[in-house]
Amino acid sequence: MLKINNLHVYYGGIHALKGVSVSVNPGEIVTIIGSNGAGKSTLLNTISGFIKPKEGEIIYKGEKLIQNPYRVVKKGICQVPEGRLVFVNLTVRDNLMLGAYLRKDKKGILEDLEKVYSIFPRLKEREKQIGGTLSGGEQQMLAMGRGLMSNPEIILLDEPSLGLAPMIVQRIFDIILDIKEMGKTILLVEQNAYKALSIADRAYVLEQGKIVLQGEAKEIASNSKIQEAYLGKK
Ligand code: ATP
């Protein structure tokens, strides 16, 4: 479905992605794990068209993806960014509706709003509340809900657990599984390797801009080097 081939990305003199290749099949949760600065956000931002790669290509459903953020969303790829970026002065409902700004099918938009409310009842309860007054976990839910409002086929999730209390983190990961059940494909970037591997089908380990390991999430989770480096086990 999504095939990333030999991606090289630079920020000036910094070589942030050094020949990264990743593939995502329909209906899968694929996770990219790696520590701070490994290049995880860079990878998602490149897929979304915010950063132009120096080399390499991104193929989506057999076609080369044009590096333009609007076209990428129109094609059915939606990124939920790190740090969530909800519109702090808009209500929950208006934030969600903004996710559908490229759509014209009013009926479908309202149906998707109900779907989002069924996955996130908390957002329904707080429909009229201003985004900036939501808790961190609720803002994460809002950002994910807003992403779903574009009716994407594939969702790119950047560190959804960042800065959240453990109980909320569990809730967010349960919701990611619900989103998979809706038929969506998910590319999940996480520092919380333990949680990410527990819900993913396949995983890639990114270190200093290079994929150093890939495989079934279960296999990666039982790899002793990974346990030592990312899961805090010896
Ligand atoms: P984190 O989990 O901390 O967000 P990450 O794995 O997402 O880390 P990136 O944010 O993709 O990592 O960063 C990869 C590398 O590129 C880092 O060395 C970072 O300092 C560098 N980098 C990222 N954005 C820029 C930028 N705008 N200008 C210069 N260097 C950048």
Image (spheres, rainbow, N blue to C red):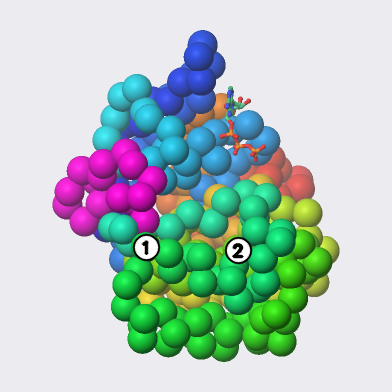
| Residue that appears at 65% across and 58% down | 87
Would you say residue 118 sits in the magenta stretch? Answer: no
Amino acid carrying mark 1 in the image: Leu
Q: Secondary structure at mark 2?
A: helix
Q: Secondary structure at mark 1?
A: loop
Q: Which residue, as the protein is rendered here, is positioned at the far top?
A: 13
Estimate the x, y position of residue 182 in percent, counting from the top left.
43, 80
Ligand 1's quadrant? top right
State yes or no: discs 2 and 1 in contact (Cβ < 8 Å): no
Estimate the x, y position of residue 119 in percent, counting from the top left.
57, 83
Estimate the x, y position of residue 14 in percent, counting from the top left.
53, 16
User: Which residue occupies the foreground of this view, 94 or 80?
Assistant: 94
User: Which residue occupies the foreground of this view, 150 or 164?
Assistant: 150
Q: Viewed as shown, does residue 211 lie left or right of 162?
A: left
| Residue that appears at 28% across and 58% down | 75
The correct choice, above or below, for 57 with respect to 224 in the image is above
**Tally of numbered tags:** 2
**Callout 2 crowding tier (Cα within 10 Å): few <14, some 14–19, many ≥20:** many
In the rendered image, the quadrant that contains the N terminus is: bottom left
The correct choice, above or below, for 96 with respect to 225 in the image is below
Point out the stretch of residues depicted in magenta.
59-73
**Callout 1 crowding tier (Cα within 10 Å): few <14, some 14–19, many ≥20:** few
Amino acid carrying mark 2 in the image: Ala
Residue receiving disc 1: 102
